[in-house]
Image (cartoon, rainbow, N blue to C red):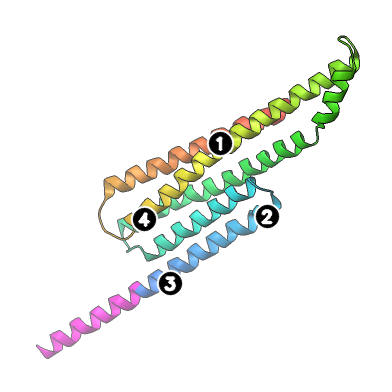
Amino acid sequence: MARILSGSWFVAVLVGVLTWVGRVLLATRIAKRVQSLERRIDPFALREPWRFFVRDALSARQRFADALADADGGPLRERLLEIEANLDHAVTVTWDVAQRGQQLTDARRRIDVSALDRTISSTDDGDPRRTAAAAQKASHERLRTREDETRERLEILDARLDETIVRASELATRTGGAIELDELAGQVTGMVDELDSLRIALDEVGNDT
């Protein structure tokens, strides 16, 4: 009996040590992955509001990494690892979209609307200067519209990302929940698809201008 108890105690200790080592290795892997993202992405290269979206996406990605490091091994962790790859892509695309948003802002600000208004008010219809000024002012309005639409869509996606991270953190604390994990994975995939569509639309706008 003593030998059996002694053996059981040894197995329990061994399992505990292996579990701890596994979590440390996973946490190290996650930390390296997040650091790799941060090296490629520099939110401080952008101005507000675009900087905010990138910083928040990186913060959300780190919170997910923390939740994943605390998750028990097995199917739950494997499913979360799949979701993690999609989140990495979401952060990268957020960075791409934010850079394009910054380009829209810069292009709009280079147009001196006050000077254009003065030209329009001081020239007659049919004057080439008036026509050119009106065309530039129309370009300014189109840029502003695209800028506002991009910011609004990023605001919505940013809120959904935060919601996703909170849900993932909750699921990581308990076993089971396969259906909930599938729903979460679907939400992340949908969010990534929307980000990709937004990036493609901005690329097309850039090619047209």
Residue 197: x percent and y percent?
Answer: 55, 33
Q: Camera-side residue: 58 or 124?
A: 124
Q: Can residue 109 be seen in this view?
A: yes
Q: Residue furthest left?
A: 1
Q: In this view, does 68 lie above or below 87?
A: below
Q: Mark 3 = which residue? A: 24
Q: Mark 1 = which residue? A: 152
Instruction: Check if mark 4's residue and mark 3's residue have beta carbons within 8 Å.
Output: no
SS type, badge 1: helix
Q: Residue 112 appears in which quarter of the rendering? A: top right
**CA–CA distance between discs 1 and 2?**
21 Å
Which stretch did the figure color magenta?
1-19
Q: Nearer the viewer, mark 3 or mark 2?
A: 2
**CA–CA distance between discs 3 and 2?**
31 Å
Q: Can residue 42 be seen in this view?
A: no
Sequence-wise first label, 1 or 2: 2
Q: Does the magenta stretch include residue 102?
A: no
SS type, badge 3: helix
**CA–CA distance between discs 1 and 3?**
39 Å
Q: Residue 44 carries which label?
A: 2
